[in-house]
Image: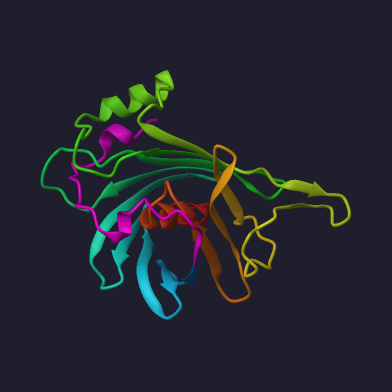
Amino acid sequence: MNGFSKLEDITYIENNDLFNKEKNEFIEYSIKRTKHIIRDRFVLKDKDKILLSAVKHIGYFYIYTGRGDLICKLKYWDFGRKFKCLLINSGQESNELLYLKYFKGILYTEGFYDFELIIHKDNGLTNIITKQIKHLIFFQKKNYSQFHYLINKYPKYNNIDSSYTLKFKSDKIVISSVKNFIIENNNESILEFGRGKNEFSMSYKTPLSMVEAFTICLTTFVT
């Protein structure tokens, strides 16, 4: 948890469709990555419509709407094959904390990620956590009553191919990659991410919002 107490003051952003958690069926989108020398750019699209974009630069992913408005930032700590991330608001008008969205993971030498995700159940304006130490208390005491505690589905080892494999709902995920993963909630798949022929595919459903799903996928580009 070292470093979380040093985050800048942030404030909450009002709900919109990007934070809607009520999508009960899988919705599939594409993510295109463009590499640059200094910073990488990621675009989340529904066919030709840009929904979200992100720029990776010096410890942050900056998340924008399709119109180019900055809505939040994903702060990350890169420890080689391990990482920690915290999704925060872009505003700095008060010392109120955005609802906790905490991601951490490790890339195993076998070639897959192991995730631990903690996301607040409500994106409303009530019960805002106002002191950063409360986040640490929730972690230390393992009190997840106000949070979704999500983990990834472990891949199965295929003796024929001598590799780890996952079964995806999407037929667009066709290339093996250490970035491919499935996130589960109570043994139900709620987020799938994987490499296609020319871009990545992302599918998600409740209890995740589009912003949460997109930023979780971005964490695979930290290490």
Q: Is residue 11 left or right of residue 154?
A: left
- Identify the residue at image location x=29%, y=47%: 88
Q: Nearer the viewer, residue 182 or 32?
A: 182
Where does residue 119 sit, x and y in percent of width and height?
39, 40
- Identify the residue at image location x=28%, y=40%: 99
Residue 11, magenta (yes or no) = yes
Q: Given the current orientation, which residue lies at the most extreme top position? A: 141
Kindly tell me whether residue 58 is visible in this rendering. Answer: no
Q: Is residue 105 left or right of residue 74?
A: right
The overriding secondary structure of the stretch rendered in magenta is: loop
Q: How is the image coloured?
A: rainbow
Q: Nearer the viewer, residue 22 or 71?
A: 22
Residue 189, magenta (yes or no) = no
Q: From what the image shows, is residue 82 above or below residue 35?
A: above
Where does residue 109 sit, x and y in percent of width and height?
69, 45
Q: Nearer the viewer, residue 155 or 171?
A: 171
What is the count of numbered marks?
Answer: 0
User: Toward which corner of the image does residue 174 lie, by quadrant?
Assistant: bottom right
The quarter of the rendered structure image containing the N terminus is top left
- Identify the residue at image location x=55%, y=66%: 201
Q: Given the current orientation, which residue lies at the most extreme left position? A: 93
- Identify the residue at image location x=70%, y=62%: 176
Kindly tell me whether residue 184 is visible in this rendering. Answer: yes
Where does residue 33 sit, x and y in percent of width and height?
48, 70
Q: Given the current orientation, which residue lies at the most extreme front position? A: 24
User: Toward which corner of the image does residue 65 lie, by quadrant?
Assistant: bottom left
Q: From what the image shows, is residue 100 above or below residue 176?
A: above
User: Toward which corner of the image does residue 20 lie, by quadrant?
Assistant: bottom left
Q: Given the current orientation, which residue lies at the most extreme right position? A: 160
Question: Where are the magenta residues, as a range?
Answer: 1-28
Where does residue 92 sit, x and y in percent of width and height?
15, 48
